[in-house]
Amino acid sequence: MTPFHPMRNLPAKAQFKKGDVLVVFGELFQRGYANGIVDEAEKAGLKVIYSTVGRRDSDGRLRPLNEEELAQKQKPLVNVPLEAGFDMEPAQDGTTPVQQLAGVKLGTWQDAKMDFAKLEQSRAAGRERFRANTQSWLKEVEAQIPNGANVIFVHTMAGGVPRAKIMMPVMNWVFKGVGDRHLSSKTFWDSDMGRFCAMSFEDVTANTFSHLLELSKPLKAKIEKGGGRVCYQAFGAVVTEG
């Protein structure tokens, strides 16, 4: 079992100051779990650079925010779609992982079989798209960082539940169900749907942070050469001791 170490004391105050920069790698919606660090950054006088995961049109195409959507967002915002994962990414035959689960019912979900060769094709395409967009995003971020500024990148991508209609009802049985509506987590994670979900979680929550660390190395080196300091923080699930 993995040991967990609760934080019982607040860490020392970070040495960030007015003129430094906090970069949000992901999109903030209303009052989410990562808004607190943005509030603290603004109180300290940091410049906050926002991002977006983009939006999907009715045909499934991923796009940047349009003018109406941008008007509702805080600025500055780098309008490059940073949607993570591969659940909506077409495989070589044009079908997406979500389409593989179309028509699956609550009474038959355990019998649902997925084509994992196609899932891997979608996964590879999703990673390629995400990395290419991240590189474009980094170029725009770089242009907005003042010389000599300290920078903190805040990774806010967590979760990764595939957007198939059948997924949430079944997962609710696992995480919230009681009595006849409780489902063993082992039953779920051993199923094809569960294996797909685990792949999606890994790509959205973990691998995106790895991509950020790798792809931002040249920018990190440039900032440090100019006298600045670069830090990274990743948000995930928050639990309490007890």
Image: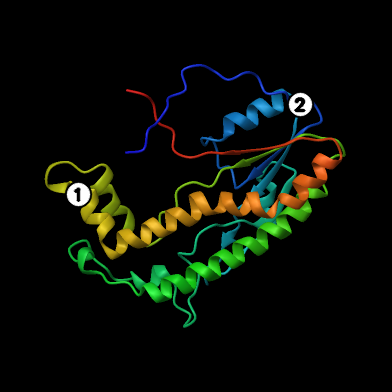
Q: Which of marks 2 and 1 is nearer the N terminus?
A: 2
Residue 82, position as x, y percentages in the image: 61, 56
Q: Is residue 71 above or below residue 117?
A: above
Q: Quadrant of the N terminus?
A: top left
2 left or right, relative to 176: right
Front-lying residue, 154 or 77: 154
Q: Is residue 61 above or below residue 223?
A: below
Say which residue appears at 51% left-offset and 35% top-offset.
33
Point out the frontmost of discs 2 and 1: 1
User: Farthest bottom residue?
Assistant: 93
Task: Answer yes or no: is residue 209 visible.
Answer: yes
Query: Element at badge 1?
Result: loop
27 left or right, relative to 205: right
Q: How far apart are marks 2 and 1 (CA)?
A: 48 Å
Task: Answer yes or no: is residue 165 visible.
Answer: no
Residue 207, position as x, y percentages in the image: 53, 54
Identify which amino acid the numbered label 1 is placed on: Ser
130 left or right, relative to 217: left
Label ID, residue 184: 1
Say which residue appears at 68% left-offset and 51% top-offset.
70
Say which residue appears at 44% left-offset and 33% top-offset.
238
Residue 142, position as x, y percentages in the image: 79, 49
Q: In which quarter of the image is residue 29?
A: top right
Q: Quadrant of the C terminus?
A: top left
Query: Element at badge 2?
Result: loop
The residue wearing badge 2 is 45
Q: Specify few, some or many for label 2: CA neighbours under 10 Å numbering under 14, 14-19, or 20 or more.
A: some
Label ID, residue 147: none
User: Farthest left residue?
Assistant: 180
